[in-house]
């Protein structure tokens, strides 16, 4: 029989027990190493995404701010492999899986698809056909949790040097990359995410970031 005296399972403890993630120090070390391999604006973007995720998570009862910070900090870690487009999500997934951090690996894949359609990706598909099929199947079969949703939102809010308004970011992407049949449903998904976290946080999230 195992008797643990003085052990109290808090929401934070439960969260950390269930999640398979590195510590904040390990996560920051991984990002620093990645920067030496492939420096660029994505490092600042990752740090701002993490800042936003932590600030919003602190106001949400069911989220742990440190967990949100680590997920956000590593969401683009696949960019350590070099300058790539959609490939960074599968590279991040494999890197995190190789370290045993399956929950971070999941975020590497889900962060780019708030709208569950692989064709909604903002950029070039530089993955192989097999990898594309893997991503498509993973996204379709994954029921998003609030960490997936939070990192999707914060990814869209984070520029390399600070947070911006989601509406401004959405318009900016269309000006640069054009408008297609998926633009409106995607905009709606992002605006719904913003509303969702406004309600959970009990305030306009722009006040927090
Ligand atoms: Fe990102």
Image (cartoon, grey):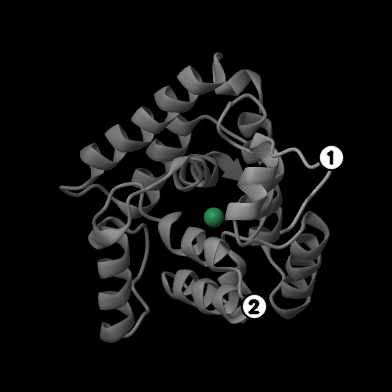
Name the residue tied to disc 1.
Answer: 6
Please tell me the numbered disc located at residue 45. none
Task: Name the residue at 61% across, 30% down.
Answer: 56
Q: Residue at x 78, y 76 (%)?
A: 36
Q: Position of residue 162 (x, y in %)?
A: 68, 39
Q: Is residue 19 above or below residue 11?
A: below
Residue with the most extreme left position: 181
Labels 1 & 2 near each other (Cβ < 8 A): no
Q: Secondary structure at mark 1?
A: loop
The image position of residue 117, as x and y in percent, is 23, 56
- Out of 155 and 183, give the one closest to the viewer: 155
For the point 43% across and 63% down, which residue is it? 109
From this view, report whether residue 94 is shown above or below residue 22.
below
Instruction: Look at the picture and state if 119 lies above or below 72.
Output: below
**Residue 51 pos. (x, y %):** 70, 40
Q: In the visual, does 67 lie left or right of 189?
A: right
Quick one: label 2, few (<14), some, or many (20+) residues within 10 Å?
few
**Rendered view: 204 above or below 87:** above
The residue that mark 2 highlights is 99
Q: Secondary structure at mark 2?
A: loop
| Marks 1 and 2, the one that precedes in the sequence | 1
Crowding around mark 1 (Cα neighbors within 10 Å: few <14, some 14 to 19, many 20+) is: few
């Amino acid at each position: 029989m195992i008797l643990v005296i003085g052990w109290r399972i808090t929401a934070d403890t439960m969260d950390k027990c269930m999640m398979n993630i590195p510590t904040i120090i390990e996560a920051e070390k991984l990002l620093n190493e990645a920067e030496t391999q492939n420096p660029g604006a994505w490092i600042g973007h990752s740090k701002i995404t993490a800042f936003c995720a932590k600030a919003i998570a602190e106001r949400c009862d069911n989220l742990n701010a440190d967990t949100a910070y680590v997920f956000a900090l590593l969401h683009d870690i696949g960019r350590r492999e070099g300058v790539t487009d959609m490939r960074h999500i599968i590279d991040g997934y494999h890197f995190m899986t190789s370290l045993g951090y399956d929950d971070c690996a999941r975020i590497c894949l889900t962060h780019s698809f708030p709208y569950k359609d692989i064709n909604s990706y903002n950029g070039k598909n530089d993955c192989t056909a097999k990898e594309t099929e893997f991503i498509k199947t993973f996204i379709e079969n994954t029921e998003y949790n609030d960490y997936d949703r939070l990192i999707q939102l914060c990814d869209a809010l984070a520029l390399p040097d600070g947070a911006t308004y989601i509406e401004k970011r959405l318009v900016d992407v269309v000006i640069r990359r054009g408008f297609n049949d998926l633009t409106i449903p995607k905009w709606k998904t992002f605006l719904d995410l913003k509303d969702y976290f406004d309600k959970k946080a009990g305030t306009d999230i722009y006040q927090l970031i």
